[in-house]
Image (cartoon, rainbow, N blue to C red):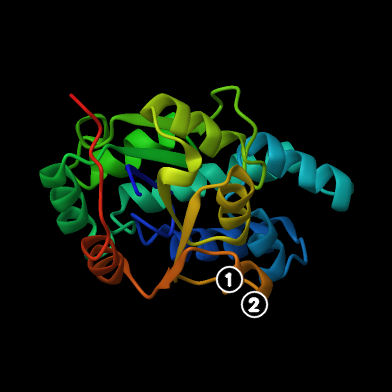
Amino acid sequence: MTKAVVFDMDGVIFDSERVWQSVFKTVSDRFGYNLGEYVRHNLCGMGEQSIIAYFNENYPEIDAVTFRKASLEEYQAEILRGENRVKPGFLELVSWLKEQGVPIGLATGSTSEQVALCFEKAGLDYKAIFETWVCSGMGVKGKPDPEIYLVACEKLGTAPCDTVVLEDSINGLKSAIFAGCKAVFVRDLIEPSAEILSKCYACCENLEEVLALLKSEKFEAKAP
């Protein structure tokens, strides 16, 4: 029985993967790095430390710290320009979950500063929406490691097997699956392999489909 829902942020709540796609190409071209879209796919969902480690291991010729600093600055500029829109159905889904008394959390590879910026620019208070949040920089291993979702479940007081996780990235889905959560794939820009999809609890085209899915479920709200 589902007792809680945990959201990923980029690509699930916000249409930010398209922003990152543009930023990644812009900054790669600026530095003269021949990095294809597949590299961004490999990084999607990871925390900052994991991203730096990935570059150091696979592209030692790249100054990973400088590249990421430039990427984050470009991303922030795009957010401030209003290029990061809330995905359709998010507010309706949150409203329904709160009506049902279902606790909701956030688990993201973005830093708390990035989270605050994205929600503030959208006119939303993430601390009022989520009961708990786990971000990059909080001393938790990033996706695809399961720790971020295990910590989120612990903070919500629910077992992973009773927790639905909404994810769009390959690393995020792996993290949720490894944690033993009910991983729901919400389609965005990256299509996981058939093997990963077969391990998902469900696959949805958008958050409207997620709402329909959850409405068909039986929930057990956490006691006040």
Please say whether residue 41 is visible from this viewpoint: yes
User: Of residues 99 and 65, which is closer to you in this image?
Assistant: 99
**What residue is drawn where x is 28% and y is 35%?**
130
**Looking at the image, do the residues carrying marks 1 and 2 touch, with CB atoms under 8 Å apart?**
yes
197 sits to left or right of 168: right
**What residue is drawn where x is 68% and y is 45%?**
67
Judging by the rendered image, the residue that carries numbered circle 2 is: 194
**Residue 211: mark in rendering:** none
Up/down of 201 relative to 218, above or below? below
Specify the amino acid type for callout 2: Ala
Please say whether residue 63 is visible from this viewpoint: no
Q: Residues within 10 Å of mark 1 (few under 14, many from 20)?
A: some
Q: Give the SS element for disc 2.
A: helix
Up/down of 101 relative to 139, above or below? below
User: Of residues 198 and 146, which is closer to you in this image?
Assistant: 198
Please state the horizontal and vertical placement of residue 50, each as a whole percent of the image.
Answer: 70, 40
State the CA–CA distance, disc 1 to disc 2: 5 Å
Judging by the rendered image, the residue that carries numbered circle 1 is: 197
Please state the horizontal and vertical placement of residue 4, each as a whole percent of the image.
Answer: 33, 42
125 sits to left or right of 16: left
Quarter of the image with the C terminus in it: top left
Please state the horizontal and vertical placement of residue 164, each as a whole percent of the image.
Answer: 40, 51
Specify the amino acid type for callout 1: Leu
3 sits to left or right of 44: left
Up/down of 125 relative to 5, above or below? above
Residue 42 falls in image quadrant: bottom right
